């Protein structure tokens, strides 16, 4: 984050430090969003074992590239 801030400030066309910090705060997800309460797993084996034990389906999110579809 510091590198990005410095680069933006050095370009002259970028945001001021205060503008960057304000926008960064505004864009961060709220702490009470529903997806934050889900006990996500980063290990496929651990997730599979838990799903099997609890007899629940396994949700797999997989992607290649930018999450915004821009790359």
Image: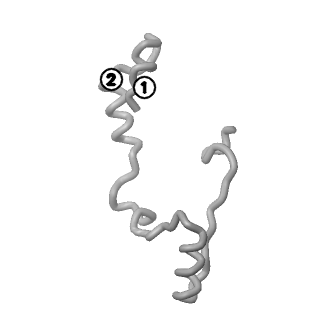
Apparent side of residue 8 relative to residue 58 in the rendered image (left or right):
left
In 3D space, how far apart are the residues under numbered discs 2 and 1 (Cα atoms)?
12 Å
The quadrant of the picture occupied by the C terminus is top right
Indicate the position of residue 19 as horizontal and vertical percent values. Answer: 34, 26
Q: Residues within 10 Å of mark 1 (few under 14, many from 20)?
A: few
Q: Residues within 10 Å of mark 2 (few under 14, many from 20)?
A: few
Looking at the image, is 14 positioned above or below residue 37? above
The quadrant of the picture occupied by the N terminus is top left
Q: Residue furthest top?
A: 12
Please give the name of the residue rendered at 63% of the width and 43% of the height, measured from the top-left corner.
66
Indicate the position of residue 62 as horizontal and vertical percent values. Answer: 66, 59
Mark 2 or 1, nearer chain start: 1
Label 2 SS: helix
Contact, CB < 8 Å: mark 2 with mark 1? no
Please give the name of the residue rendered at 42% of the width and 65% of the height, measured from the top-left corner.
34
Apparent side of residue 37 relative to residue 66 in the rendered image (left or right):
left
Please give the name of the residue rendered at 34% of the width and 61% of the height, measured from the top-left corner.
32
| Observer-nearest of 15 and 47 | 47
Question: Viewer-nearest of labels 2 and 1?
Answer: 1
| Observer-nearest of 44 and 10 | 44
Query: Which residue in the structure is indicated by mark 1?
Result: 3
Looking at the image, is 47 positioned above or below residue 25? below
Query: Which residue in the structure is indicated by mark 2?
Result: 17
């Amino acid at each position: 984050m510091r590198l990005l801030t410095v680069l933006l400030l050095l370009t002259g066309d970028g945001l001021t430090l205060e503008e960057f910090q304000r926008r960064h705060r505004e864009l961060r997800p709220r702490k009470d969003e529903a997806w934050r309460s889900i006990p996500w797993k980063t290990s496929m084996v651990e997730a599979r074992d838990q799903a099997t034990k609890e007899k629940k389906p396994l949700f797999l999110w997989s992607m290649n590239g930018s999450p915004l579809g821009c790359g």
